Image (cartoon, coloured by chain):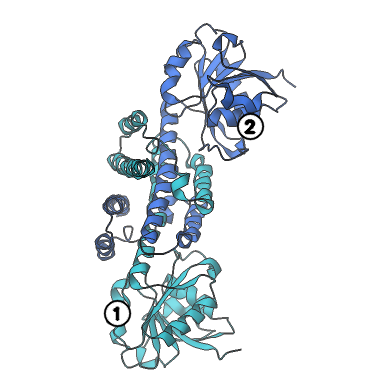
Chain colours: A cyan, B blue
């Protein structure tokens, strides 16, 4: 076996916590230190590693993983400029690699929604996008990623951003549509439960076939009569706007593709 | 056992086909006839029942199920005015019960997206909303529904419409967001596969917890910096509009609830 990779995690939020839980018991990895401004957020790791709240106690490692809020990353990295022998990565989808004010910089972006409730996250199917300035660092990150996931790929900052925004579409926005569906039913005294089989089926389809082929509904059929009926029925202004915009977008998607065909 | 219910199905599309497949081999049901303008669309039922393309051959039954396009239902029902001893229902989410120009009218609305590819549909978890003018017909429809689903409920035309539109939100619109996510990745040379674990996770969450609680992302955190970054990054106009509108809607949802709390 290769020599284990020594990492330290800087941060105490969701991503930091899930990575620390995962890496704290792997033979290929030594979780050297965890830093957080407030020790109470990383207390659960007290028995497995050295937890610190003072950056002056931070020791060189193979990799520092900065897992803190996006808008704090750049300034935080300035406190690490003296660590020229450590690869320093952030875990953000939307922050450019060059925002890191250090020599050996990189990105280690696990693409998933991390919520606190979940005890253990199964990383194996979670895509991890990595980026580095130096080839040897890219290799090191590939190795680090592959210890927990079988979907590790090299991607530049722009690709990473597109994946992050793609995630906003298929997770945050999709969930909001579930919410709007629930609200609509609630206002007509119907239980949200009724929507669940459909939610499941649509997600299942998106896994096994292309969303373009899976599309159904009045907008895709260009059924203006039903669309008008639905818009007249909706009393809630935001719901009306969402209905209109998404129907238009679907309509355009399929009218263009019909033109392409003919 | 009670006397079987004699039904005839009028139509040859997805809903008609799936209902006919299901009801053609149930002891509680006699599938008496299937009518369609074009016989070729209902040929698969030739060996199990009487298939006809001429309404003058239609015989009285306990129930006629009209499963044709929404905009054809009203006129079609006019051809059935002489059947005063048969309960006549349509299967549409968006058509009022009173559009049926017959005496004993009703609605039998299975709430699911029916696609032709699927051979057999598992009706057991599919909600069926029923409505009738006469109490005895409501009873009969409940009985018919319960032979195939354990989620049969009585709902008026307005409730049915709200469920139909709710379905447009959580199925048609959600699928379009999957599509937009895929397009965005494609334009940055990333595979759609990367989105699948997240799609699955978000749907799973919507089944086990309330969408309001499950919400995450920049709009919910009111992270204007990231929202601006994402909007600047998006080059596609419809994607930009969708991003903006749905972020605003999420923002309003959570700022209102914060006000409620305080």
Residue annotated with mark 2: B148
Task: Measure how far apart labels 1 and 2 are at the Cα level.
Answer: 60 Å
Q: Residue at x 50, y 83 (%)?
A: A46
Give the crowd class for mark 1: few <14, some 14-19, many >=20 residues within 10 Å. Answer: some
Query: Is B141 situated left or right of A227 in this image?
Result: right
SS type, badge 1? helix
Give the crowd class for mark 2: few <14, some 14-19, many >=20 residues within 10 Å. Answer: some
The answer to which of B167 and A34 lies nearer the viewer is B167
Image quadrant holding the C terminus of chain B, namely bottom left
Label ID, residue A225: none
Residue annotated with mark 1: A98
Q: Is residue B48 above or below residue A4?
A: above
Residue B19 can be seen, yes or no: yes
* Of labels 1 and 2, the one closer to you: 1
Q: Using the image, name the chain to which the residue with label 2 belongs.
A: B
Q: Is residue A190 above or below residue A14?
A: above
The answer to which of A234 and A35 lies nearer the viewer is A234
- Image quarter for residue B240? bottom left
Residue B97 can be seen, yes or no: no
Q: Using the image, name the chain to which the residue with label 1 belongs.
A: A
SS type, badge 2? loop
Q: Position of residue B128 (x, y in %)?
A: 54, 31
Query: Is A143 situated left or right of B51 in this image?
Result: left
Q: Position of residue B26 (x, y in %)?
A: 70, 27
Q: Position of residue A32 (x, y in %)?
A: 48, 88
């Amino acid at each position: 076996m290769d020599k284990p990779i020594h990492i330290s995690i800087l941060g105490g939020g969701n991503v930091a916590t899930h990575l620390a839980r995962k890496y704290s018991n792997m033979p290929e990895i030594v979780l050297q230190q965890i830093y957080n401004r407030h020790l109470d957020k990383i207390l659960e790791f007290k028995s497995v590693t050295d937890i610190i709240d003072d950056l002056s106690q931070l020791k060189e490692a193979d990799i520092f993983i900065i897992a803190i809020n996006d808008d704090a990353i750049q300034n935080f990295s300035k406190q690490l400029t003296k660590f020229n022998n450590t690869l320093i990565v952030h875990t953000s989808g939307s922050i450019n690699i060059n925002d890191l004010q250090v020599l050996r910089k990189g990105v280690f972006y696990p693409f998933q929604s991390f919520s606190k409730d979940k005890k253990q996250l199964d990383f194996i199917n979670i895509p991890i996008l990595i980026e580095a300035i130096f080839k040897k660092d890219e290799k090191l990150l590939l190795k680090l990623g592959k210890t927990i996931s079988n979907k590790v790929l090299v991607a530049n900052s722009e690709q990473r951003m597109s994946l992050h925004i793609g995630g906003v579409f298929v997770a945050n926005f999709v969930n909001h549509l579930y919410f709007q569906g629930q609200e609509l039913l609630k206002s007509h005294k119907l239980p949200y439960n009724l929507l669940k089989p459909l939610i499941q089926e649509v997600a299942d389809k998106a896994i096994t076939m292309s969303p373009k082929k899976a599309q159904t509904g009045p907008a895709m059929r260009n059924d203006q009569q039903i669309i008008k009926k639905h818009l007249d029925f909706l009393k809630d202004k935001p719901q009306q706007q969402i209905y209109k915009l998404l129907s238009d977008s679907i309509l355009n998607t399929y009218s263009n593709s019909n033109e392409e065909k003919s």
